[in-house]
Image (cartoon, rainbow, N blue to C red):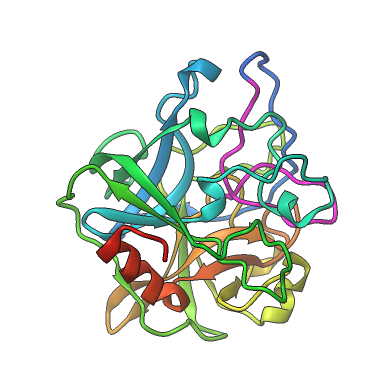
Amino acid sequence: MSFAAAVTVSIAAALTAPVTAAVADTPPPVEPMIVGGHPATSAPAGITSLQYDAPAHGAKFVNYHTCGGALVFRGWAVTAAHCVTDPPAGAASGSTARRFAADAAPIPTADKAFHVRVGSLDRLSGGETATVTKIVVHPGWNWAQGAPKNTVSDIAMLKLDHLLQQPTVQLARDTARRGSKISLYGWGVTEPDSTSTDLPLHLQQLDTRVTAPSRCADAAMSVGELCTDNPSGTDGSCYGDSGGPALATVNGVQQLVGGASRAATEFCGTAPDVYTSSPDFRDWIYHVARTGNAT
């Protein structure tokens, strides 16, 4: 499993897929990672690969998987806000903003044409595809400035150009409690090799639990977020898993309880991860789907 590009030592890492500069073949400055998921045997309802085309930055940036997401309505998917916004200009390496975006040469959001693939185990085939026609970012999202006192609100909604026939994921009503069993899903980096930027084609799954918020204190965890455990101290989300779903089984049905936001350290799998708690933003998600507006 995996999140975003590497960050400066001592601050938490976001989970978007690593990006390399188009003018060089050298890998991005990602850090060693120990993950430990396994191939999912079936695609959970609403599973989404968020991709973009930015051919001006290199041929590899076509159908480029950057984050995960979840189809919550037939015409709307939810992902992490940092997947679809640019960090503040001139953000210092030690600032809170750097927790989420630290690509060596990030591609501006304006240069990306986003689309999704929904309902497939394979991020490059199967399921259904749709173009993202509108991005609605939570009004509280400000690259975690003021966290943990202020709510981070790392969440955004993606309007699709047509209604999909794929089943949507059920949105949990209640915040997942400490000790609750959850499964994390994503197409993030799976190898502990710091020189590898290859992402798996097959969806990965990691079964874990919600753990104490204090264990994510180093990631400036705020209200409206979950701290997910890293089994054996070696497994967790990593680069490429941002926005990907955390699902809990309620009455035999998988329900969406969170979306991947960031790690508690820059080393994947070595510490718990922070997930935006989907039920805490349930009213906002419904509001956006009804009105198309953030407020």
Residue occupying image coordinates x 69% and y 45%: 88
Instruction: Name the main secondary structure of what is drawn in magenta.
Output: loop
Q: Is 154 on the left or on the right of 137, as rendered?
A: right
Q: Is residue 268 visible?
A: yes
Seen from the viewer's position, the closer of residues 31 and 133 is: 133
Residue 11 left/right relative to 76 = right
Q: Can residue 248 be seen?
A: no
Query: x, y percentage for residue 158?
Result: 36, 51
Q: Quadrant of residue 172?
A: bottom left
**Magenta residue span:** 1-21
Give residue 125's position: percent from left, percent from top.
Answer: 29, 34
Tell me what residue is drawn at x 75 percent, y 52 percent.
266
On the rendered image, what quadrant is the C terminus found in? bottom left
Membership of 151 in magenta stretch: no
Looking at this view, is 21 or 140 the one in front? 140
Tag count in the figure? 0
Q: Residue at x 52, y 86 (%)?
A: 177
The image quadrant of residue 89 is: top right
Residue 138, position as x, y percentages in the image? 49, 62
User: Is 238 in front, or is 111?
Assistant: 111
Residue 258: x, y in percent? 47, 68
Establish if 247 lies above or below 109.
below
Q: Residue furthest left?
A: 165
Task: Please identify the residue farthest to the top as the structure is shown.
Answer: 23
